[in-house]
Image: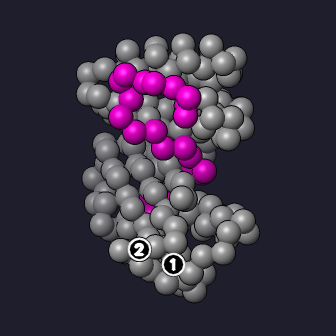
Amino acid sequence: MADEISGGQNLVALVRVKPGAEDRAAKELSDLFAKFKVGAEVRESGIGGNLFVFSSAPKGYIAAVLARAKLAYSRTILLVDATSRADAESIIKAASRVLADYLMKKKIGSFRVKARIRGSTIEEKEIEVVVGKALKESTGLVVDLENPDATIYVSIVGEIAAITVA
């Protein structure tokens, strides 16, 4: 999916910006990446207040550059572990891969799914419940909405779902 939307680069971050400040935020991010010689492209998502960052650089390097920055126009930066189409079946497949990779690095007993949706008619609670149920069945982990060991974030922007686990 990432190659379909990026021409070969990976979607490495979803950036939520102040509404109406997309152009300024994109320039600010582009200047930051140029300063640190990161080959990254910042694009508007087509949904107000959301920018995509594409790069072939490792996600950890992108994270380190963003952590150093004082960004005036960016509100939230979500580093992306996987992308999929914005339908439940595709999201479940991508979230299952992300969680499986996470479980290889860290032992956890519980999780929750948090969804944020912009530019789609899909309901956040619907995604949280459907994805959570599928992941619970496939992993045997406990769903804990209050104090989970990990959270799977699903951010849908238009036709694209960006997934990460933390």
Q: How many marks?
A: 2
Three-letter residue code for mark 1: Ser
In three-dimensional space, the C-alpha distance between marks 2 and 1, rounded to whole angstroms, equals 8 Å
Q: Can residue 87 be seen in this view?
A: yes
Q: Indicate the quadrant where residue 67 lies.
A: top right
Residue range in magenta is: 66-91
Q: Which residue is drawn at 46% across and 39% down?
A: 77
Q: Indicate the quadrant where residue 35 lies.
A: top right
Task: Evaluate if marks 2 and 1 touch, with contact meaning CB atoms under 8 Å apart.
Answer: yes
Left/right of residue 12 with respect to residue 48 in the rendered view: right
Q: Residue at x 28, y 53 (%)?
A: 121
Q: Name the residue under label 2.
A: 147
Q: Which residue is drawn at 61% across and 29% down?
A: 65
Three-letter residue code for mark 2: Asn
Q: How crowded is mark 2: few (under 14 residues within 10 Å), some or many (20 or more)?
A: few
Considering the numbered disc 1 on the image, is that residue within a helix, a strand or a loop? strand
The vertical placement of 129 against 165, above or below, is: below
Instruction: Say if the magenta span includes residue 87.
Output: yes
Q: Residue at x 65, y 30 (%)?
A: 55
Left/right of residue 106 with respect to residue 11 in the rendered view: right
Query: Tag on residue 110?
Result: 1
Tell me where residue 57 appears, x and y as whole percent.
71, 32
Left/right of residue 143 with respect to residue 48 in the rendered view: right
The vertical placement of 159 against 130, above or below, is: above
